[in-house]
Image: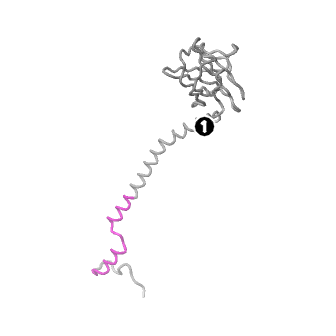
Amino acid sequence: MKRKIFPSSKHTNSRSELAKLKRILPSSKRSQSQVVTTVLLILIVMVTTGIIIGFVVPLVRNQLSEGDCLQFINKIEISSNNQYTCYNNTASYMLVQIRMGDIEEELGGIVIEAGGATTQTFEIKDGAAPDDVEMYDGGNIEIPGRNEARTYNLTTVNSQPEIIKVYPLMVNNRTCSAADVLNTISVCV
């Protein structure tokens, strides 16, 4: 025999049938709280996602734009040869030799930073450099080519720096992070 879930008549006074209905059908208050809880959870997830996207997307964009600089890691270095990278105490100038590795993409230039109590930066591009930068051999200013080295005379470095850094300069004039750092600067022989 089939069990009836709903009463057969419109009006019922049977308590047992009402009790069965209450067990089978959830109460309206409980149903409403479940719907409200679900909607609130969805809103919380949406707001959290928006906040995370607001922080992560700019961070990822910055990291991707710095990806252009990855090719210069370990490919631009400061020579530690004390004949070509040194400070001259008597004449107050600094020689810095920069070596380029096997770089495939064109480099816009380099930035040399000589630091200590005061820091000076020198932006060097092919054919263009500040007046206080000269080529070691006295020729025209040029950046090293692929697998080459160039030595620069920084004429306004008035005291022996504690550190020298070299930064790649992209063709679009964006400066990358330091490609090499030299912490020991010797006196010229």
Mark 1 closeness class: few <14, some 14–19, many ≥20 residues within 10 Å: few
Where's residue 52, x and y in %? 47, 45
Q: What residue is pinned by disc 1?
A: 67
Q: Who is closer to the viewer here, 58 or 139?
A: 139
Q: Residue at x 61, y 34 (%)?
A: 69
Magenta region = 13-37
Q: Compared with residue 106, is residue 159 higher up or lower down, i.e. above or below?
A: above
Q: Who is closer to the viewer here, 28 or 171?
A: 171
Magenta region, main secondary structure? helix
The colour style of the image is one colour
- Horizontally, is 15 left or right of 115 in the view? left
Residue 168 image-quadrant placement:
top right
- Horizontally, is 118 left or right of 41 in the view? right
Where's residue 26, x and y in %? 35, 70
Residue 32: in magenta span? yes
Q: Who is closer to the viewer here, 189 or 105?
A: 189
- Secondary structure found at label 1: helix
Where's residue 48, x and y in %? 43, 48
Viewport quadrant of the N terminus: bottom left
Q: Who is closer to the viewer here, 37 or 108?
A: 108
Residue 189: in magenta span? no
Q: Residue at x 38, y 54 (%)?
A: 40
Number of numbered labels in the structure image: 1
Residue 51 image-quadrant placement:
top left
Viewport quadrant of the C terminus: top right
Identify the amino acid type marked 1.
Answer: Gly
